Image (cartoon, rainbow, N blue to C red):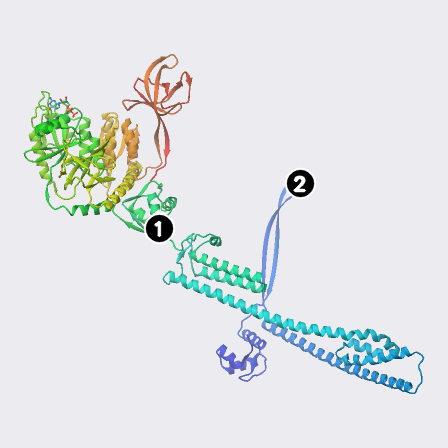
Amino acid sequence: MADKTVKQLAQMTQTTVDTIKKQLVDAGLNARGDNDIVTEIEQQQLVGFLKQSHGEVQKSRISLKSKTTQTAKVTGTSGKAKNINVEVRKKKVFEKPNANKIAEELAQREQALKQEQEKAELAKQQADKQQDEKQKARQEAEARQQATLAAMYANLNSGKKHSDGNTTSVVVKKITKPDAKTTNTEIAPTKTAKTQTVKADNKTAKADKKAPTKAVKPVKKENSEQRKIREAEEERLRQIEAQNRRKSAEEAQQRTLEKMRQMASKYSDDKDGESTTVVRRDAGEPLAEGLVGQALEDSFEKERREIKRGSTSNANKNRRRRRDDDNEQEVKNRARGLKSSHANKHKFEKPVEKIVHNVEIGETIVIADLAQKMAVKAREVVKMLMKMGELVRETESIDQETAALLVEEMGHHPVLVSSTQVEDSLRESVGEKSSNVQARPPVVTIMGHVDHGKTSLLDKIRSTKVASGEAGGITQHIGAYHVETEQGVITFLDTPGHAAFTAMRSRGAKATDIVVLVVAADDGMMPQTAEAIDHARAAGTPIIVAINKIDKDTADPDRVLNDLTTKEVVPEEWGGDTPIVKVSALTGQGIDDLLDVIHLQAQVMELEVATDGAAQGVVIESRLEKGRGAVTSLLVKQGTLKQGDLVLAGEYYGRVRAMMNENGKKITAAGPSIPVEILGLPDTPMAGSEFMVVDDEKRAREVAEYRMVRERERVLERQAKSRLENLFDQMNDAKLPTVNLILKTDVRGSLEALLSALDELSTDEVKVKVISSGVGPISESDVVLAESSEAVLLGFNVRADGAARRKADEAGLDIRYYSVIYGLIDDVKAAMSGLLSPEHREKILGIAEVREVFHSSRFGYAAGCMVLEGTIIRNKPIRVLRDDKVIFTGQLQSLRRFKDDVTEVRAGMECGLAVKGYEVQAGDKIEVFEIHEVKRTL
Ligand code: GDP
């Protein structure tokens, strides 16, 4: 609020000049003209008056009160502790400055100032007066001295000799001196003048005596004058220096400001003009303009400190320069999102921006691979998934959808690709070259129970249909052969068992077109017959039933037909869709009929493929042979395979160096449905893998590598899917609205009970499908079927045999054992509703086989055992298994090694044991297990 004219005040308050004038008068101030000044104080007075007149009561005083209570514990005289509350009250009064009061104070101060000025004036006048008086006195004294001198000279001139000449000369000297003194009296201090006056009034001698002391003073006066001049000069220099310093400081400020501006503009340029929240800091904080602002402030603060210090020494300048550099670096670092200024100490500079990767995601992806594609640690991905509510390990895989979400969450671009994209494009380019489409021969697999005559039937067909010369020349077993009939060629796959059939299917390739199920007419439906039906059904392959051994007297084909209906295989003659042929592998009866039916079925299936162009097909089997390397049997399914072709089979690729047919005869080309054996692959691909001829080695390598990764993913995926806990998640997946189970039990009674109970579990939304069931231990074949059908293996009072266990471990399948029907039903039910958690599961710790049973006086009997697997632990529960079926559950009564009681015996060692309350037999297995709680894992 500076001094203003009335006009200015009127403008400022947006009122008229007259109003202001009137208000001034009302406030008790002097009347003014339009351009008269209203001082700051007057303005405050006016404001105070107006506030009062408008009824605004100003609160000039504020009181703040505070109260704190503390509790002190004091021990009283009686020894009892007492709590005393101590209340501390504080009051603070703040007085608000009042405009009138200020005005009053100011007026008072003004008054005091005036008085002081007057006093000073008076004092000055007095001093001047005294000065004049002194001057006068001095002049009088001089006049008197002159008079004395004149008298003395007069005496001398008159010849009157003085007694002491020396004294006279001294006097002369002393007389001349005061002249010089007189010239300086004006600038001499008042005190000196006073003294001189007094001295001048004294006797001349006395004045003379004092003279030598006074004579030194003029020199001193000169020095002080010089000092004053020097000081003035120094002051002037200091001012110039300060001015220069200020100027350089301002320049430095300007420079820093300019740098900031440049940086800010560069920064925003980098981000297409976005100036806020563009770069993320490590902690994910956005770096906004505020940060640059902060940097500016920091910089200015430093400058200010520098100015305050006012140091201009070189050392300081250098230091400042260094600091400037540091500061600049710091600002740069901040702008980059670095947390620490120490970052500039390293040569490595963290990238300014996060690199956004295009992450290709197939139908599933392993966490570790996903992390690699995003260039982050797998741990981070796991952590992120945990935040998203998924608990997955690094080695496990997640589905495409989840992966895409995660990738987006982590700031990268997900690129969804079909798992088979690489192969599809290759297949397309291969397929384009084919043009001649023709019907191809059907590929048949013969399945059935052991000893029902599979081999005999195959041999009979071959011996009757293969030219005698060739038949005799069969030297190679390549797993397949073809026969020529009147209606055309039929290719037979000579697979060693159902497991192999399904294993081939699980590799993705459908090698078999038709299944011929051999059932001995004298034996009927047997477990492996049922298993074969399950496998064929799971593969979706049509079945032709060949009732063999029809030549036998005990043959009862109707019984076979009856049995088949129990597995829902209904003969055509009974209104079903399964062709039935009665044959005899021994006599050859019905063989032609069987071949006719196969042809008929093939025609219905319209098996048409391109017969020329690049070949595609299936690996039937492969082996390593000394001197020949990898020998691979292939079944061409379309196109023509030629010697010299570049073949990509499964995860390997190579050129066909040599090619043989099933008779070991060298051939140079093989058309559709023709099995061949080739040399040239670097390793043995898995049976059932697809093969194709490619012309580009680079692409072959790409696909081979891709397949290797996919195979790994498949195993991991299967591991997850085979878990009963995960069934619910699978069901949520629209592709799998059913729960696939493979159930094995100890007796038929419990199997039927379980099947009907499981059947009742099916609802409109979820279907429980028992793909395969049976009595007996879980076999390798069951495991393979579970693997290919994504089914869960359940054993009720039965165990998996050694081969099945190994297979299950290999495939990462989970086998669940139960001994209570409701336990099994409840688990499946819980799995269906996604509520399987936490649960009690059995872990088998060790298995021992009973080799011999001895009589023991103490326990009644004792079993001499060999520990086959794991460890037999004395205090854990046990089960007795006979033919892989549970026959007793209990505890051990004793466990010994060489007459010593022991707590555990490891695999490969012999031991003696006794089971409490049960007499074991030689050949029984003792299984030690423990029950532990498993939390549900996703
Ligand atoms: P696979 O185990 O299913 O391959 O059965 P095999 O082909 O080894 O045959 C088992 C046994 O049944 C052999 O001793 C054959 O001689 C016999 N056999 C096979 N087919 C017939 C047939 O049609 N009639 C008679 N009587 N015996 C047969």
As drawn, the residue found furthest toward the left would be 486
List x then y, in percent, for residue 778: 26, 28
Please tell me the numbered disc located at residue 78: 2
**Side of 252 relative to 265 (left or right):** right
Disc 1 packing (10 Å; few <14; some 14–19; many ≥20)? few
Report ligand 1 position as a quadrant.
Answer: top left
Q: Quadrant of the C terminus?
A: top left
The quarter holding residue 141 reads: bottom right
- Earlier in the chain: of badge 1 and badge 2, it is 2
Q: Does 546 appear above or below 190?
A: above
Relative image position of residue 911 (x, y in whole percent): 37, 19
Q: Along the line of sight, which residue is nearer the eye, 817 or 582?
A: 582
Classify 567 as above or below 151: above
Q: Which residue is mark 1?
A: 409
Instruction: Measuring from the top left, give residue 134's x and y in whole percent.
Output: 79, 81
| Residue 924 showing in the rendered view | yes
Task: Tell me where residue 230 appears, x and y as whole percent.
Answer: 67, 72
User: Crowdedness of circle 2 by 10 Å Cα count: few (<14), some, many (20+)?
Assistant: few
Q: Quadrant of residue 608?
A: top left
Residue type, numbered disc 1 = Glu
Tag 1's secondary structure?
helix
The front one of 407 and 192 is: 192
Q: CA distance from mark 1 to mark 2?
A: 70 Å
311 or 596, which is in the foreground?
Answer: 311
State yes or no: Cβ of the residue under disc 1 lies below 8 Å from any atom of ligand 1. no
